[in-house]
Amino acid sequence: MRGGGWGRIFRGCVALGAMSLVCSCDGQARERDSQRGVAAGGAEALPVGESAILISLSEGIESAAPRLIVLSGTQVTVVVAGEPQGRATWQLAFEDTVLAEGALALDEEGIGRCRLAAPDVRVRTECRWVFAGRAARRSAALVVLPQTALGPSAGRIAARRVGVIDPRGQVQQALRREGVQFADLASEIQRRFFDGGTLIVAAHEEDVNLATVIQGTEKRLLAGLSLVILNPPPGWQGWGVTSVRAPEPVTAPPRLGGGFGQTVLESDLGPGPWRRVLETGPEGRVLIGLAAEGSSPSGGAFGLAVARRVGRGWAVAAVHPELDRPATEACGRAILDDLILWTLANP
């Protein structure tokens, strides 16, 4: 969930360390040895790109426990709705270990805000965030993914020689944060002479532009190139893969195909609705399928990620809203990581 302005809010800026909590109170940062922090008042709109969830502590209002997946270090804001001028407490824990806890005051509209940085992790970590008010107690799941999931494969990625074409620079930012080597193919000359094993193409919203960028890759595909296209525009088709805009948004749970899912889980992807899907013929391989969609009229299948063997190489495409922002969005990053790992395992 994304939030905007909520009137006058209260915020606590928390950075989690192994045994300490950094809390911003009235503009003065201080480090504390105890695992307790109290949110301070202040008017502020939610920064662009920050992740947020809403917790209702109002009596009689029941809601499913939110689940938020973020990258380590991401600023996370929880907007709490409860009694006007009331008080709420919160506690963030991993298994039986309390990482942080605190309290916040609610304004005259019953709104308060708790803000912290997701902990630095080396592996996927699921924390439980509990909030309590006078009338209700609610919890949320905070799933934190590492920024460097590709680290153990950095040597193989360097040997594979990955190239990136992304005018927005999102894929480049993501791979820099991963700490892996890649070639930023910003110019036509660089693209023409690129001879690596994997080429990632993103941020081309018109099929004619995408066709121009990947023109000339056929010979390299036949020779063993893995071409990975992120969010191809509706109407694009190539090598037995077609990007389709659904007449009506599709709501169906994703299902991971064999060999896919080293970093992303089905539960990370969400149930939709999916406004754009991929269709592949019977020769294609579905990496992320849609459980309720069945076969396409051509006898193939629909999905969010598909691959098609072309000579000795692979044409791979994937669609998901967060693939436009893999530098900051956890699900987009996890799908990107898995696509790269899949090309390593399927040269």
Image (cartoon, rainbow, N blue to C red):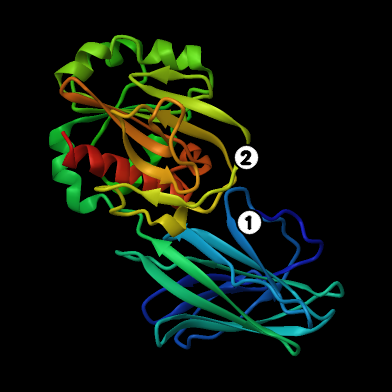
Q: Is residue 187 left or right of residue 221?
A: right
Q: Is residue 67 above or below residue 242?
A: below
In the visual, does 227 lie left or right of 53? Answer: left
Tell me where residue 309 appears, x and y as whole percent: 23, 26
Q: Nearer the viewer, residue 322 or 316?
A: 316
Give the image location of residue 104, x and y in percent: 69, 80
Amino acid at pointer 1: Met
Q: Residue at x 59, y 83 (%)?
A: 102
Q: Residue at x 31, y 40 (%)?
A: 339
| Horizontal and vertical percent position of residue 159 | 12, 35
Labels 1 and 2: the sequence-earlier one: 1
Marker count (numbered): 2
Residue closest to the eye, 219 or 131? 219
Mark 1 nearby-residue class (10 Å; few <14, some 14–19, many ≥20) = few
Q: Secondary structure at mark 1?
A: loop
* Residue 167 visible: no
Of labels 1 and 2, the one closer to you: 2
Q: Which residue is at 17% across, 37% downward?
A: 158
What is the CA distance from the residue labelled 1 to the residue labelled 2? 19 Å
The image quadrant that residue 174 belongs to is top left
Residue drawn at point x = 63 percent, y = 52 percent: 47
Asked whether, in this view, residue 331 is left or right of residue 187, the answer is right
Question: Which residue matches tag 2?
Answer: 249
Q: State the image quarter where residue 9 is shown.
A: bottom right
Residue 148: assigned label:
none
Q: Amino acid at mark 2?
A: Pro
Query: What is the number of the mark on residue 1?
Result: 1
Pointers 1 and 2 in contact (CB under 8 A)?
no
